[in-house]
Image (cartoon, rainbow, N blue to C red):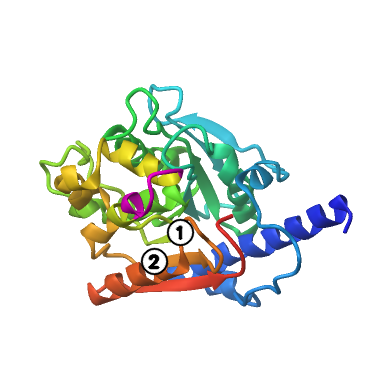
Amino acid sequence: MPAHANRRRESARARRHQRLLPVALALTIGWPSLAAGQSTAPVSPGHVRLLRASDVDTMAVGDPGVRIAYGADSLQFGVLRLPGVTGKARVPLVIVIHGGCWTSSFATISNTSPLANALPRHGVATWNVEYRRADHPGGGWPGTFLDVARATDYVRTLARHHPIDTTRVVVAGHSAGGHLALWLAARPGLPASSPLATAGDRPLALRGVVSMGGIADLAEFAGRSRSGCSVGAVRLLGGEPAAFPERIAQGSPMAMLPLGVPSVHVAGDQDGIAPLAVREAFAAAATRAGDRATVDRVDRGHF
């Protein structure tokens, strides 16, 4: 098959997968208009290679959005995109968090830009967040966590200047960003003495979380191998999980259940980084803890 035909098929599949997130959001917080007429059925496999991070990075983004700083560091910023709004209407918001193994060499905010660009067409604003990773000065433990927490709470400031409904906010993340998204949902349960607890206003209330190939159990993930993304989890924690049980207790969503809000876990059936079985295990544990948690199985891999 010619290369250009392969690219067209990959792009079409990526667009189909993007449509799953509005469905997941609709199921999570009850927006029936988003779910109408859409299906989460897996697409047929075909004979194409799995999408890679670099493929997603090069997808077209029509709306560049507005870059807004939520802190003083050059990496403490987000990109806000808004749907068309008439009158005094306020719109729901999705906080979007990219992955990349919690380190700088794998992914940036560009990896979630196509998704953040797509959702406003469904009437949903997006706040696509950048943050310091474990290999950045000030990142890792606790800086990476505090960055996404600060970006989330900054939504209150955004809402003073933009038509955002702060009572309808969902956080969505991919891969390592899925871990941070789940952690943000669990954050209100942190003890006040935790280095991850933010001073000042209480955490912004979230209506739900969507984890796309997310890492929900840091201890399981860090112990799975000693190469690739698992090393990033060790760097995030500042060492081996066994050496920092209090960091697992306060930084791993699996150890922080219940989240207290519904969660949807989009899981690829060929995802070797975040296997479907591990997503199902987390959803089952969350359900036992009293949460509403579902797994949306999709065809193919991590991206």
Q: Nearer the viewer, residue 34 or 223?
A: 223
Question: How many residues crowd around disc 1 within 10 Å: few (fewer than 14), some, or many (20 or more)?
Answer: many
Question: Crowding near pointer 2: few (<14 within 10 Å), some, many (20+)?
Answer: some
Q: Which mark is residue 231?
A: none
Locate the C terminus by quadrant: bottom right
Query: For this view, does 272 lie left or right of residue 102?
Result: right
Q: Residue 289, located in which quarter of the rendered image?
A: bottom left
Three-letter code, disc 1: Ala
Q: Residue at x 59, y 74 (%)?
A: 40
Q: Residue furthest front?
A: 226
Q: Could you tell me which residue is drawn at 31 percent across and 49 percent down?
A: 204
Give, as a three-letter code, the residue at label 2. Answer: Val
In this rendering, does residue 205 appear at all?
no
Q: Secondary structure at mark 2?
A: helix
Residue 100 lies, in percent from the top left, at: 49, 42
Looking at this view, is 135 or 260 the one in front?
135
Determine if the magenta segment contains residue 163.
Answer: no
Is there a contact, CB below 8 Å, between mark 2 and mark 1?
yes
38 over 110 or under it: above or below: below
Rendered location of residue 237, percent (x, y):
27, 40
User: Which residue has dot 1 on it?
Assistant: 274
Residue at 33 percent across and 36 percent down: it is 235
Q: Residue at x 50, y 72 (%)?
A: 296
Query: Spatial distance from mark 2 to mark 1, Cα to Cα?
Result: 7 Å
Residue 222: say if magenta.
yes
Tag 2 residue: 278
Q: Which residues are magenta?
A: 221-228
The secondary element bearing badge 1 is classed as loop
Q: Is residue 286 left or right of residue 298?
A: left
- Is residue 128 at least partly visible in the picture? yes
